[in-house]
Amino acid sequence: MHKIESDYAEVRLAEVYYMLAECRFRLGNKAQAVQLLNTVRKRYYPANSPSLYPTDGSTLTEQELLDDWGLEFVIRGIN
């Protein structure tokens, strides 16, 4: 009785996109992974920006994916 409850789960939509993008990447479908990552990145960069990944996924590496996680959830998460 009279206990504090904290049953609220909080998740950012961007996190869902990034998790799904990582799954697609690890399954070898870089084009789908890039599409998901660019969906989130378009909030910060204009259309046709060189900061968006090419749609064929040719430049996406595991290190890029990890760097993007850090940028989105550590750097941008502070704001």
Image (cartoon, rainbow, N blue to C red):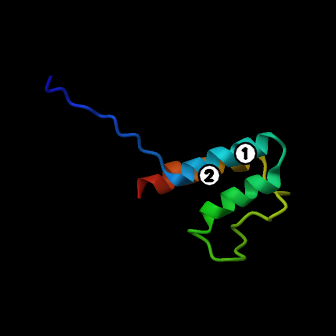
| Quadrant in which residue 51 is drawn | bottom right
Which mark is on residue 3? none
Q: Residue at x 42, y 53 (%)?
A: 78
- Tell me the kind of residue under disc 1: Gln
Q: Residue at x 81, y 40 (%)?
A: 27
Q: Residue at x 49, y 51 (%)?
A: 12
Q: Position of residue 56 (x, y in %)?
A: 85, 61
**Mark in front: 2 vs 1:** 2
53 left or right of 6 in image: right
38 left or right of 8 in image: right
Q: Tell me the crowding category of disc 2: few under 14, some 14 to 19, or many 20 or more residues within 10 angstroms, Cα based.
A: some
Q: Residue at x 73, y 60 (%)?
A: 35
Which residue, given by chain and number where applicable, does mark 1 sit on? 63
Which mark is on residue 17? 2
Q: Position of residue 11 (x, y in %)?
A: 47, 46
Q: Image quadrant for the C terminus?
A: bottom left
Q: Secondary structure beneath disc 2? A: helix
Looking at the picture, does residue 57 appear above or below residue 26?
below
Q: Secondary structure beneath disc 1? A: helix
Q: Position of residue 26 (x, y in %)?
A: 78, 40
